[in-house]
Amino acid sequence: MAQQSFDVVVIGAGPVGQNLADRARRGGLSVAIVESELVGGECSYWACIPSKALLRSGSAFRAARRVPGAREATTGVLDTAAVFARRNRFTHDWTDDHEAEWLAGAGIELFRGQGCITAPKRVSVTAKDGSVTELSAVHAVAVTTGTTARIPDVPGLSDARPWTTREAVSVQSLPASLAIIGGGAVAVEMATAFTSFGTHVTIIARSRLLGRAEPFAGELVAEALARAGVSIHLNVSPSSVSRTEAGISVNLNGATVTADEVLVAAGRAPHTSGLGLDALGLDSAALTNGWLNTDDTLLVRGTDWLYACGDVNHRALMTHQGKYQARAAGDSIAARANGSAVDDSPWGVHVATADHEAVPQVIFSEPEVARVGLTAAAAEEAGYEIRVVDYDLGWVSGSSLHADDYQGRARMVVDEQRRVVLGVTFVGQDVAELVHAATIAVVGEVPLDRLWHAVPAFPTMSEIWLRLLEQYGR
């Protein structure tokens, strides 16, 4: 049995693990990284990258059809074979040689196999051939294993061999019909993609669409999906699911939805099974239902050696936030190892303060939803005295030039006591590129009086900022 020692051992070689390992390595530490599947992780092969590759062609096609001149040049339907080929290029046909090469170039040693924490600062790695390598960490072990799809406890659902996001984004041939269980970001994105390919899609959601966003966001997306031919069942849950030779049957307490395939998009579960966490004696402050709980330096509570970054800590389940956490964690591990001071004050270099009230998200649905910070409801629940400012994005000159009959809406949530922006939501075509300006305003706590001097170029969609400020008043 081989034994090796490193300053840091990272379990999980997705974008989060890679970023943490790189920051620790740049801090002068030796780093090993453990991966049981493909280097690059869920995001690179079964989530963010392939899903956005599938969505982009339909988005570009629809955008062209909204502008006279381009509209007349767009004929026929999407070439799905070409869409899939482009997606396959982005996933490198589900091979990870390029990612492994990057790790080697960064001076990070890769161990392929299932990692298990056997004791504080000890990780056992079992390779596919059964060989075992024992790794010891001088300073820290970091868990960056992410999440897996959660399959609800619906009679017959597991036996029906449902799709998860993995099957949906790696599909090589289209079903004629698809039922989607769930109403969140994954559900509406996959409904948007498959509808653009000509598949008949049915959404089954236990509440409204996009329940964590402003209510108007889900309403506008539902209206657009319905116009595109999607059947939507809200405020209902499946009572049972079965698969026959004819396809899938989803029973909805009296009604029945039939489809060729069913996609479960009903949340995520921590990917911590088999990591040995239960044997470490962690209390409920550190480990809750498989989720690892951390402080803002990403140190697991009650430990001085175990870190958790990305979806596995349940702070903000998005790749960009996980990478942000990883940079803070990698730097804090290196600082502690080198005897340097750790800046754990809010917005300090070694913390992930933005996780709490400044998280940006883009949902690449039809229309897009881009938001950051708190919704009006969340801000009120947090005790802020707020004012909500709404504006129709279609009334902005840049939007009307961008697409004929532009449909969209913007909302700004203002903390009235400090007169700073707590949250912003945009819904409309191509609003994804508006969200970073909003993120800067929220994170920087820029006073509204100063925002008046951030003049948006004319005629662009960013003019929405001027209109929101005018609506608010000086």
Image (spheres, grey):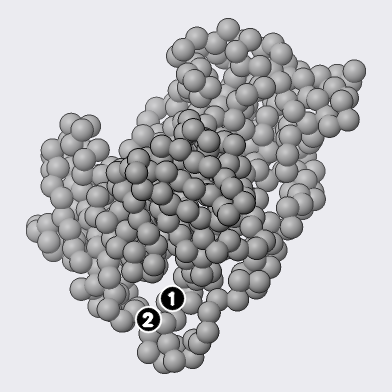
Secondary structure under badge 2?
A: loop
Is any atom of residue 356 visible in this view? yes
Check the image and report above or below for 405 versus 125: below
- Looking at this view, name the residue that lies furthest to the left: 473
Cα distance between the residues tagged 2 and 1:
7 Å
Disc 2 and disc 1 in contact, CB within 8 angstroms: yes
Check the image and report above or below for 285 versus 430: above
Q: Could you tell me which residue is drawn at 66 percent across and 21 percent down? A: 275
Position of 96 compared to 51: left or right? right
Q: Which amino acid lies under the numbered mark 1 shown in the image of this protein?
A: Arg
Q: Which mark is residue 66?
A: 2
Residue 418, quarter of the rendered image? top left
Q: Could you tell me which residue is drawn at 42 percent across and 56 percent down? A: 202
Q: Quadrant of the N terminus?
A: top right
Judging by the rendered image, the residue that carries numbered circle 1 is 62
Position of 98 compared to 440: left or right? right
